[in-house]
Amino acid sequence: MFSVHGIIPNKTNKTNKTNKIEQPALVLANPTTDSYLTMTDAFALKLNADFVLLSVCNTGCSKKDCSENVRGEGIMGLCRAFMYAGTSRVAVTLWSVDLHSSKDLNIELFTNLKANQKMAHALHKAKLKMIQGQASNQKYAHPYHWAGLVVYGDE
């Protein structure tokens, strides 16, 4: 599980500065050239994992507008890279996530998986708990807090 900051190439941040990174990446430390795990780096990994959770902002996107589609391949990005590296399922986010609601959603997801629930059912139950206000905060019922987490890969 990665719970760090994610970067989309050429995206403008809150201070109106555009990053100069050329591919999607995870920020593993204070941003320097060595602190990123880029899409290329992820492609080079050799994993033997059933599931990788990228609980990071925008990991389901590969470009500023989330639209780098490769004919026959779908969206390119960190999800595809981690699957190529050897995991059968990858959870990614489709937008910037809230730290607290993301934490609650992930804890519930892993609790459900630990109880031997299938991935789709475990994620469904975790999202329902957020919607029904059973998580630690009632405001989590809004789709912003739970709808952006999606899983790709084998059941």
Image (cartoon, rainbow, N blue to C red):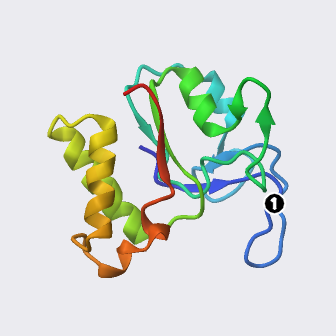
The answer to which quarter of the image holds residue 43 is top right
In this view, the residue farthest toward the left is: 115
The answer to which quarter of the image holds residue 116 is top left
The answer to which quarter of the image holds residue 50 is top left
* Count of numbered badges drawn on the protein: 1
State the residue position of label 1: 19
Q: Is residue 23 visible?
A: yes
Return the residue nearer the eye: 37 or 141: 141
Rendering coords of residue 67 (x, y %): 77, 47
Q: Secondary structure at mark 1?
A: loop
Q: Is residue 98 visible?
A: no
Give the answer, above or below, for where 131 lies relative to 70: below
Rendering coords of residue 63 (x, y %): 77, 49
Kindly identify the residue that appears in the image at 38 percent across and 68 percent down.
101
- Categorize mark 1 by other alpha carbons within 10 Å: few (<14), some (14-19), many (20+): few
Q: Is residue 143 left or right of residue 132?
A: right
Give the answer, above or below, for where 78 lies relative to 48: below
**Looking at the picture, which amino acid does disc 1 mark?**
Asn
Which corner quadrant holds the C terminus?
A: top left
Rendering coords of residue 68 (x, y %): 79, 41
Rendering coords of residue 92 (x, y %): 52, 46
Kindly identify the residue that appears in the image at 79 percent across and 30 percent down.
70
Q: Is residue 3 left or right of residue 85?
A: left
Kindly identify the residue that appears in the image at 51 percent across and 57 percent down.
148
Return the residue nearer the eye: 11 or 72: 72
Kindly identify the residue that appears in the image at 41 percent across and 62 percent down.
102
